[in-house]
Structures are given as structure tokens and as C-alpha cells.
Image (cartoon, rainbow, N blue to C red):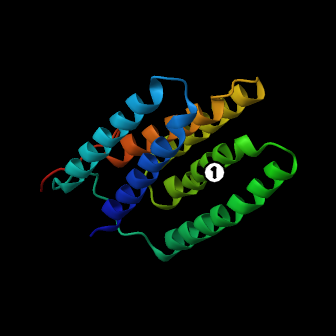
Amino acid sequence: MPGKILGALVAAIGGLTFVLVNAGGLPDPWPWLLQGLSVLVFIWTLLRLRQPGALPSGQRPDARSWRTYMVSVGLMLLAFPLGARLLNMYDFAELVVLWIVLVVGLHFFPFAQAFGTPVFRNVAASLVAAALVGMGLALLGVAWGPAAGAVAAGFALLGYSGGLGQRAAQPA
């Protein structure tokens, strides 16, 4: 399986998980509607990824790009528990899911440069925006703010993993 397809599959699974786990925090009837829609979008993504050339063709990353990738992922994995711990210590446990969304989003910014793939900038910006809007809503007292931010992030991941905003590889 090519790396770009594997990456898209990981993003799709992550997106589906964000929606299925967090939609329950939204007022009725949104949980079941959004969960059902996320399953349909996930199936669409899987079908799309099976099509030849579904995602843009890219160049094989060089060693420097792989180092950037490894450092970015390593920092993301380190940031998850550290931020979660701080948020829990200061009684902001409801923001932990949005911390995860924010960190996942930020970890995509270096990818855009390292892999020469601008879509990673769009993914990053979408996730960061979803996290910040959700945090803002939560801090304003909107109880479903964290769920809304996480669900929005999930749909962003699902859409981009299916090729949203990307040009498919052109046949030779």
C-alpha cells in the first residue's frame, strides 16, 4: 500500500473516531445524524481511495523530509499527555479533546513544507480552527463546544483523506 494511501486511511479512521466518540456531546438530533453521516463519508473515502490515482502523485520524500516527519510525530506524541495533564490539573478536562485536535493540526504544518504538499497546510489550518473555535465556545460556557470542535475536526480529516481539495494524479 503506497504511503499516501496509508496516511489517508489513518486520517480517515481518526476522523471517523473523532465524530463517533464526540458527537454524543451535541444536542439532539445531531449525534445520530452526524454519526450516520460520518459512516457514509468514511465509506465514500474508502471507495475513493480504491480508485487509481485518487490522490495526487508526489515525489518520494528525501531523508530530511522523513526526519521532519519523525520529529513532528514525536513532538505530537509528547504534547498529548503533557497538555492533557496540565488541562486536567487546572480543571479544564473538557478541553483535552480539543488539545488533541490542536496538536494533531499543528503537527501537519511541517509536513506541508517537508513533503512539498500544500494540502497539509489546509488540513492543519482546518484542525487548528476547529480546536480554537471549540475552545472559545467552551470558555464562553457553551457545554457542547468541545464536542462541536472535535466533530468538525473529524469531518475535516474525513474530507481531506478522501481527496477533498486535492487534484487527482493525472494518467501518463
Which residue lies at the image location 44% right of the left edge and 56% below the top edge? 116
Q: Pinpoint residue 30: horizontal percent, then vertical percent.
A: 46, 26
**Dot 1, crowdedness within 10 Å: few (<14), some or many (≥20)?**
many
Residue 100 visible in rendering:
yes
- What quarter of the picture does the N terminus occupy? bottom left
27 to 55, vertically: above or below = above
Q: Is residue 53 left or right of residue 82?
A: left
Q: Is residue 85 left or right of residue 131?
A: right
Frontmost residue, 53 versus 27: 27
The amino acid on which the numbered mark 1 sits, given as a three-letter code, is Ile
Q: Is residue 84 left or right of residue 5?
A: right
According to the image, label 1 marks what residue? 100
Q: Is residue 167 left or right of residue 67?
A: left
Tell which residue pokes out farthest to the left in this image: 172
60 to 26, vertically: above or below = below
Q: Pinpoint residue 25: horizontal percent, then vertical percent.
A: 58, 34
Residue 118 visible in rendering:
no
Q: Quadrant of residue 163?
A: top left
Which residue lies at the image location 41% right of the left edge and 32% below the top edge? 32
The kind of secondary structure element at disc 1 is helix
Which residue lies at the image location 64% right of the left edge and 61% below the top edge? 76
Q: Pinpoint residue 96: horizontal percent, then vertical percent.
A: 70, 47
User: How many discs appear?
Assistant: 1
Frontmost residue, 123 versus 97: 97
- What quarter of the picture does the C terminus occupy? bottom left
Q: Pinpoint residue 142: horizontal percent, then vertical percent.
A: 69, 24
135 to 105, vertically: above or below = above
